[in-house]
Image: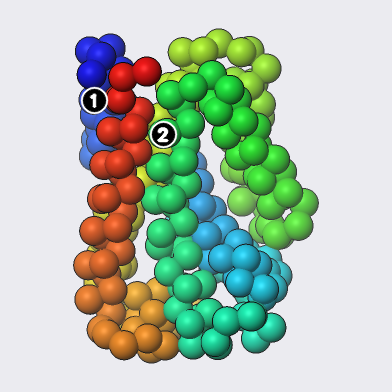
Amino acid sequence: MKKKPLLTIAGISLLVFLVWQLPYFGIIQYPLLLLGTWFHEMGHGLTALLLGGKFYYLEIYENGGGVAYSSVSSSYLNYNIARAFTAAGGLLGPAITGAILITSARNKVTSKIALWVLIVIMVVSLCLWIHKLLALIVLSVFVAILFFVGILRIRNLEVFTLLFLGTQCALSTYMQIGYLFTKQFERNGKIHYSDTQMIAAHLPGTYWMWGICILLTSAFLLYKSYTFYLRQK
């Protein structure tokens, strides 16, 4: 195992932790919070599409919350399974995306592919699925930043960007750990089920059991992506 990649991973992990824990980074925390919400809601929507359903649009609110409007009535899977998978997609989508970004940073070619695929997905999302002005502005800024990183073709900058975003995505599950173990919540005076409760409503088990499963899966994905990145070439 090379010392430099290990220090890079440790440094970026520490940076992500400090960004979210220290009050001095509020100006950075807020756009990253909204980006994390985008990854979460896109996880719901894209899962619905992959299952043969429909993804209508998503909303991101000023408080960092969000919702994805989708349907799985036309899915090729059993309705209950499709609904459960779609709910899980929002929770595991960021962790899966984070693992892909981290592992792709190990190679020049895969780094470029991952970076530009992410840019394309963001642009498609802007064009098709985002209607709220705040989300349009914030995601457009991230697209501009990633585009700038892509055209500069500076290897270290690409690696840092992918590892930072990947770690941010992978750890986002732990940053919303309270939501994982919440059965329901109130929004605009209405009671809504959490994603883990939606899984439990359509599959055997309880919301807290599925919350534990999501946490363990996210931890496994983060561990495997880090070990792959640190593996000797």
Q: Check disc 2: other Cα within 10 Å, few if <14, some if 14-19, many if 20+.
A: many
Residue for badge 2: 102
Q: Is residue 83 above or below residue 40?
A: below
Name the amino acid type tagged 1.
Ala
Q: Check disc 1: other Cα within 10 Å, few if <14, some if 14-19, many if 20+.
A: few
Q: Secondary structure at mark 2?
A: helix
Q: Residue at x 49, y 22 (%)?
A: 107
Q: Quadrant of the C terminus?
A: top left
54 sits to left or right of 21:
right
Q: In front here: 145 or 135?
A: 145
Residue for badge 1: 10
185 sits to left or right of 61:
left
Residue 29 in the image, given as x and y percentages of width and height:
39, 40
Q: Quadrant of residue 116?
A: top right
Q: Is residue 4 above or below residue 147?
A: above
Q: Residue at x 34, y 32 (%)?
A: 228
Q: Is residue 116 above or below residue 78?
A: above
Residue 105 in the image, given as x and y percentages of width and height:
46, 26
Q: Earlier in the sequence, mark 2 or mark 1?
A: 1
Residue 103 in the image, given as x and y percentages of width and height:
42, 33
Total of numbered circles in the picture? 2
Q: Is residue 93 above or below residue 154?
A: below
